Image (cartoon, coloured by chain):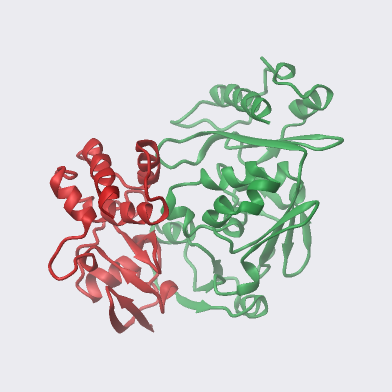
Amino acid sequence: MKEFNYHSAKDSKEASKLASSGSAFLAGGMTTIPSMKLGLATYKDLIDIKNIKKLSGIKVSGKSVTIGAATKHVEVANSKDVKKAIPSLSSLAEGIGDPQVRNRGTIGGSIANNDPSADYPSACIALNATIHTNQRKIEASKFFKGMFETALKKGELIEAVEFQIPEKSSYQKHPNPASRYAVVGVYIAKYKSDVNVAVTGAKSCVYNDKEMAKALSGNFSSSSIDGMDLDSSDMNSDIHASAEYRASLVVTQAKKAVDAC
Amino acid sequence: MGKISLEVNGRKVEKEAPDNTLLSTFLREHLQLTGTHIGCDTSQCGACVVHVDGNSLKSCTALAADVNGSKVTTIEGLETNGKMHPMQEAFKKLHGLQCGFCTPGMVMSAIDLLQKNKKPSDTEIRDWLEGNICRCTGYQNIVAAVKEAATKM
């Protein structure tokens, strides 16, 4: 791993001040460190934000669940409050990687990285999340811009993610057996007036499948999306699954999610 | 370059190390604690699992600077007065290892499981050991050893 300078920030202000064009924020490091070791990323400065107290913790109100950016997956998975308010969110956290990854990895790190196969971005889209940064609030639908790309500007730090509590929800994924990343994952959330069908792993970036959402808004039953023939032309194709197979998996996982709601 | 202060296996250590030093490198090369193994070096195999402040983590994917001030336990820190830890005893008794390369990580990970779940089922053990790979594929005996240790811990 190439040389860099390590800084531990006391608060968001200091973290932001230390940021430059050659820096990255370090949370759990579950992607940042392996990427640096493989030479896929190099930074002059790593700014550790884990010791900023304000960034950790879970708050539940009547309508929303707010999770601090540096909150670890294991904390979300084990939180009684999250289990009660949005059980699908705690089970998503429990399905990320392995116990050691969940002991380190954070929600803020996951969404800032925006891996096309990551789990949390789908939760943000399905649960109408608002991303709170040290500069502004960003709607999830405007946050995820493309493969590994977000609306975050240099030096902008995610402080918390606020999820709207749905009537019903479920996240179902077909995990890669080695990495536990989603080959395809579908997060369905039903609200009073609409339904979100967030899909991860299938395309270059998480998206809300409007076609399935429309069908489910009319009739919230897996039969209303059964046999749906999704366009696979812009779906990922790799050694794990062809685009056509992924298109089929999206429907299968969506049906499972509706049935589990 | 910065000063790394840790309590490793009950002993306070303080050493200067470059900022890009991984915890695994710090343990193996700066402290000569080579019981922590480096298998894949890409945080998949789990041979490098150690405990930091009581929780298991993959030391090849943590910076030494990042865990500064913590208490670290490695496989070398498990024995008491020359007696093996019950998990080590169980691995020995039930042949929970073949070549032994993955064993330090398996043992450290399994102990963390029993700290959190005193009586895990076979499925829970297998699920927990998701991040530990044994390329001799001796999983049957590893699971049996963890179950045995659960009766002794």
Quadrant for residue B133, please give it.
Answer: top left
In the rendered view, tell whether residue B12 sits above or below residue B131: below
Left or right of residue A34, residue A199 in this image: right
Q: Quadrant of the N terminus of chain A?
A: bottom left
Q: Residue at x 29, y 75 (%)?
A: B8
Res B134 visible? no
Q: Where residue A28 sits: x, y (%)?
A: 50, 62
User: Between residues A69 and B54, which one lies in front from this camera angle?
Assistant: B54
Q: Where residue A60 sits: x, y (%)?
A: 72, 57
Quadrant for residue A21, please give it.
Answer: bottom right
Q: Quadrant of the C terminus of chain A?
A: top right
Chain letter for red, please. Answer: B
Quadrant for residue A132, please give it.
Answer: bottom right
Q: Residue at x 27, y 48 (%)?
A: B151
Left or right of residue A173, residue A187 in this image: right
User: Between residues A184 and A224, which one lies in front from this camera angle?
Assistant: A224
Which residue reaches farthest front?
A: B151
Q: Where residue B72 sits: x, y (%)?
A: 33, 71
Left or right of residue A248, residue B116 in this image: left
Chain letter for green, please. Answer: A
Q: Where residue B99 sits: x, y (%)?
A: 14, 46
In the rendered view, tell whether residue A42 sits above or below residue A229: below
User: Between residues A154 and B67, which one lies in front from this camera angle?
Assistant: B67
